[in-house]
Image (cartoon, rainbow, N blue to C red):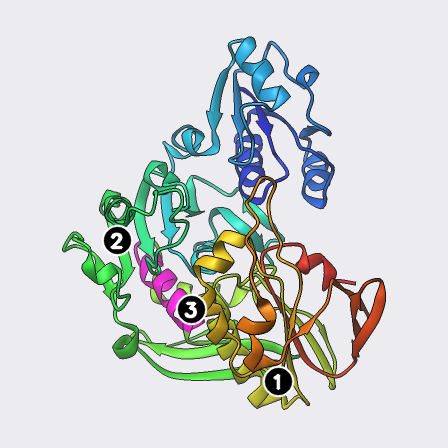
Amino acid sequence: MKVHFIGIGGIGLSALARFLNFDGHEISGSDVKSSPITKELEKEGIKISCPQEAKNIKDEFDIVIYSAAVTDENPELMESRLKQIRTLSRKEALPIILDDKKNYCVAGAHGKSTTTAILASILQSSALIGAISKDFGSNFRYVNDLVAFEADESDASFLLSNPYCSIVTNAEPEHMEYYNYDYEKFFQAYETFINLGEKIVINAEDEYLQKLNINEKAVKLYPSIDIKNITYILKDNQPYTKFELLDLGYFEVWGFGYHIAIDASLAILAALNELDIESIRKNISSYKGIKKRFDVVQSNEDFVVIDDYAHHPTEIKATMNAVLEYDKLKKMSKKVVIWQPHKYSRTIDNLEGFKKCFDGCDELVILPIWTVAGEKKVEIDFVKEFAKYNPIFAHSIQTTQGKIQLISDNKVIKVYENGLVVGVGAGDITYQLRH
């Protein structure tokens, strides 16, 4: 097939494009502007067009697949429809891409990227992940028809992912705007996804999963009982968690925290459908973390910079717990968190949680809200709401080797050259943290 992707530079759509390209199809794509992802796609033989224009749509295309960010006014989508080419959203395209594969599909509000990446490392399988695995340096890997797939609940597309094994880390309500804040509809989607799997693995202590009607064949992880003797180790300033799982012995996995042990345990229990336990124990050591998840981007004896994608209070709290464990071993002079709030809707919906989740930091820096086109602006009094942290407000940060500068009104207002600095958020803070 000849398939064109509109919005191919996105982390999710680019993985699907790569998968079809390696599966033998002729792939092209476009985006608003060039990016590191589109440049990588070009190196892989995919024709990329920037910006998006009607002339990029060719009569010979069999299918045009577009991202969730593409509107009906997009010139390429309009041209595709005028030419009567079959157009599919990313969600609608999943059955075509995954239909004949053996899919291990991981869903959950938190931890799904990490669990999927760990599982891909254990299975040594193909992978489609909404993040960059540092094991294989991509959001995608093509090996065979065994696939570790990050299934997305935000638009209910996980219902179209054809899971052989359904794996769920948790089901905390998120992206409720898609479900019109109908909690029954939201939890019904999770219940359906879980029970689609021939095999099922879940975190049975998640308060939300406990309320669902789940097939009795499910393998249920009870972390407080099944995971024991957790210890944290630093190797060349890189974090590792060691733990004992059930009667399966000890495992060591990249990352810090109780949540990492849970994610790894779910991946291990799912992988038992394919591999013996000693192969799993060996293969998990190849997991090196994923980009933007407790990603140590600078480190020396006095100064460590960590980039983390956490953008929900539950995720930030888990990251803060990892920071505290890291600091116990590293004993840094101070712990600084730089937070870039993500979207007005998420910030206001979770404001009370955000006000509590930074406990443990010595200094909190707050950047402007990272928003998306068309989002309604909401006034939030950050000075008042976060007064207990006595936060510092900056417009941006500038990073060089061994130094982070806070910038406000084009002036440097503070410099960090020692301590542990952690940036959290899902916007462009990841680029600001990388010199």
The residues colored magenta run 259-273
Q: Quadrant of the C terminus?
A: bottom right
The percent position of residue 113, horizontal first and vertical second, equals: 48, 56
Earlier residue among tags 2 and 3: 2
Kind of residue sitting beneath label 3: Arg
Q: Secondary structure at mark 1?
A: loop
Of 67 and 140, the residue lying toward us: 67
* Label at residue 281: 3
Residue labelled with disc 1:
362
Answer above or below: position of 218 versus 227.
Answer: above
How many neighbours does mark 3 have within 10 angstroms: few (below 14), some (14-19), or many (20 or more)?
some
Residue at 61% over, 33% down: 7
Earlier residue among tags 3 and 1: 3
Q: Is residue 173 visible?
A: yes
Q: Secondary structure at mark 2?
A: strand
Q: State which mark lies toward you, 1 or 2.
A: 1
Kind of residue sitting beneath label 1: Asp
* Label at residue 200: 2
